[in-house]
C-alpha cells in the first residue's frame, strides 16, 4: 500500500508549488503548471472555529491551517476540538476543499469528537515545521 498523497500544482518556470486553481502561477505569472504529488501528512500551524459561518455550513465550523511538504499550506475543514499547533495530521481532498484528521485516526472523512488532542493538551511547545 502506498502512502496517501495530495496532488498540488508545480510551476515549471519558478518551481513554486501551490494548490491547484484556475489562473497563472501566483508567484511568477506563468500559465503552465504540472501536477506534483506530496505526502498527505502535514503539521498544524493554527486552528479556529467559525461560530457564525456562511449559510450552508455547520456551526461551529472548525478550520485548520496545515503546512505540508515543500511549504505548501492548506486550509482544511477539521474536527472538534481544534487540534493544537504542531499536531501531525493527514490531509485529504474533499470535493472542492480539503479535510484533515489526526494521524492514526480512522482517516479523513470519518471524524468524531475528541479526535484531536485539544489545544494546549499536546504537552509540548509549538515547534514550527522545518
Ligand atoms: Zn511560477
Image: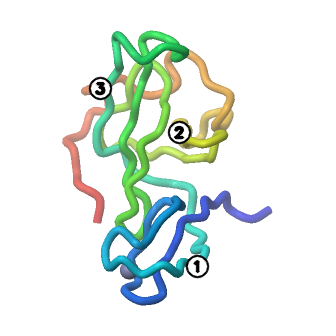
| Front-most of residues 59 and 124 | 59
In the rendered image, which quarter is residue 122 located in? top left
Question: To which residue does mark 1 refer?
Answer: 34
Q: Going from the N terminus, do you reach mark 1 or mark 2 first?
A: 1
Q: Quadrant of the C terminus?
A: bottom left
Question: To which residue does mark 3 refer?
Answer: 119
> What SS does tag 3 mark?
loop
Is 85 left or right of 106, judged from the image as shown? left
**Whole-percent x and y of residue 127?**
22, 51
Residue for point 44% across, 71% down: 24
Q: Residues within 10 Å of mark 1 (few under 14, many from 20)?
A: some
**Whole-percent x and y of residue 68?**
43, 59
Q: Going from the N terminus, do you reach mark 3 or mark 2 first?
A: 2
Q: Is mark 2 within 8 Å of ligand 1?
A: no
Residue for point 50% across, 24% down: 79
Q: Nearer the viewer, mark 1 or mark 3?
A: 1
Separation of marks 3 and 2 at Cα, in angstroms: 16 Å
**Whole-percent x and y of residue 82?**
38, 25
Question: To which residue does mark 2 refer?
Answer: 100
Q: Nearer the viewer, mark 1 or mark 2?
A: 1
Separation of marks 1 and 2 at Cα, in angstroms: 24 Å
Separation of marks 1 and 3 at Cα, in angstroms: 37 Å
Q: Going from the N terminus, do you reach mark 1 or mark 3 first?
A: 1
Q: List the single residue furthest toward the right.
A: 1
Residue for point 55% across, 15% down: 56
Q: Is residue 50 above or below residue 32?
A: above
**Whole-percent x and y of residue 72?**
40, 62
Amino acid at each position: 500500500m502506498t502512502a496517501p498523497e495530495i496532488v498540488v500544482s508545480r510551476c515549471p518556470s519558478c518551481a513554486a508549488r501551490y494548490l491547484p486553481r484556475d489562473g497563472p502561477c501566483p508567484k511568477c505569472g506563468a500559465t503552465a503548471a504540472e501536477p506534483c504529488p506530496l505526502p498527505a501528512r502535514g503539521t498544524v500551524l493554527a486552528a479556529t472555529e467559525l461560530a457564525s459561518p456562511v449559510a450552508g455550513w455547520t456551526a461551529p465550523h472548525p478550520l485548520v491551517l496545515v503546512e505540508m511538504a515543500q511549504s505548501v499550506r492548506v486550509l482544511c475543514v477539521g474536527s472538534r476540538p481544534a487540534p493544537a499547533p504542531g499536531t501531525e495530521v493527514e490531509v485529504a481532498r474533499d470535493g472542492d476543499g480539503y479535510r484533515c484528521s489526526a494521524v492514526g485516526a480512522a482517516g479523513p472523512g470519518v471524524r468524531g469528537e475528541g479526535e484531536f488532542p485539544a489545544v494546549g493538551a499536546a504537552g509540548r511547545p509549538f515547534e514550527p515545521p522545518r
